Amino acid sequence: DIQMTQSPSTLSASVGDRVTITCRASQRINNLLAWYQQKPGKAPKVLIYKASTLQSDVPSRFSGSGSGTEFTLTITTLQPDDFATYYCQQYDTYPTFGQGTKVDSK
Amino acid sequence: EVQLVESGGNLVQPGGSLRLSCVASGFTFSNFAMNWVRQAPGKGPEWVSAVGGDGSHTYTAESVRGRFRVSRDNSQNTLSLQMTNLRADDTAIYYCAKGPKVSAMAPFDSWGLGTLVIVS
């Protein structure tokens, strides 16, 4: 299995901050990487796929970048609705997820 | 609007069996691969199994291979997961999740609300 490692595990931020989350794959994944947002008691929701393509209806303050084995999710101006846990997922082979990054209020 | 509604979760003893179902609506079911994804309490999601649009190709995570079997009935817009020889570490919320194409299992662009399986 391809291992996905996210950092940090927890991130404390304020509304208006720029937030960056990193995801590293244990091997190259042909940019087949997605980012999900999950709120407590809800199912995950896809934000980004193919490393940088924004899913429809996702606000443009979310963006994805990276290639090879290192990828980044950026939230340019954190909004109150963005406090959640974020997961990366590779789908070059059988899908695997990172362990998650919880974004909470500073 | 895509809707996925899971059912069948329950409390079951170790070694027992359970069958989960997911009824889909709002899209042409046979045109999309479908997945089961689980999430143990306090943990991240874990992909479990997938089936292509016509049901002829199935894929299963190593952690459940030989114990879980995925299937679909396109005439009933239903996805199923037959789980046998259940273990305590199978305890999780099980989600039904839609793939983006008939033969592409991910990314998962729609999810159900989940059904809870407790093995104890």
Image (cartoon, coloured by chain):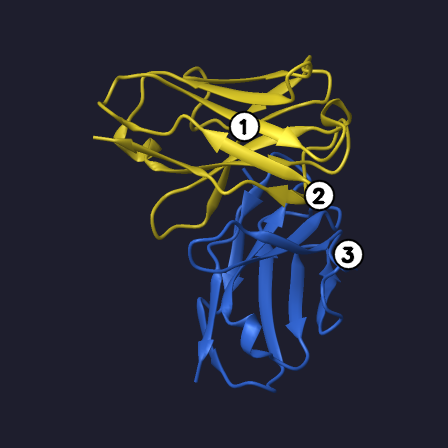
Chain colours: A blue, B yellow
Q: Which chain carries label 1?
A: B
Asked whether the residues under marks 1 and 2 belong to the same chain, the reply is yes
Disc 1 or 2, which lies upstream in sequence?
Answer: 2
- From this view, report whether residue A52 is shown above or below residue A32: below
Residue type, mark 3 in image: Ser
| Image location (x, y in percent) of residue B56 | 69, 12
Q: Mark 1 points at which residue?
A: B22
- Labelled pair 1, 2 in contact (Cβ < 8 Å): no
Alpha-carbon neighbours of circle 3 within 10 Å: few (<14), some, or many (≥20)? few
The quadrant in which the C terminus of chain B is found is top left
Residue type, mark 2 in image: Glu
Q: Name the residue under label 2.
A: B1
Q: What's the CA distance linking mark 1 and mark 2?
A: 16 Å
Q: Mark 3 lies on which chain?
A: A
Q: Nearer the viewer, mark 3 or mark 1?
A: 1
Residue at left offset 54%, top offset 37%: A1
Alpha-carbon neighbours of circle 2 within 10 Å: few (<14), some, or many (≥20)? few
Residue at left offset 47%, top offset 26%: B62
- From this view, report whether residue B49 is shown above or below residue A4: above
Q: Is residue A13 left or right of residue A20?
A: left
- Labelled pair 2, 3 in contact (Cβ < 8 Å): no
Q: Residue A56 carries which label?
A: 3
Q: Is mark 3 on a helix, strand or loop?
A: loop
Residue at left offset 68%, top offset 14%: B75
Q: Is mark 2 on a helix, strand or loop?
A: loop
| Image location (x, y in percent) of residue B40 | 37, 43
Nearer the observer, B7 or A89: B7
Residue type, mark 1 in image: Cys
Q: In this view, does B13 lie to the left or right of B63?
A: left
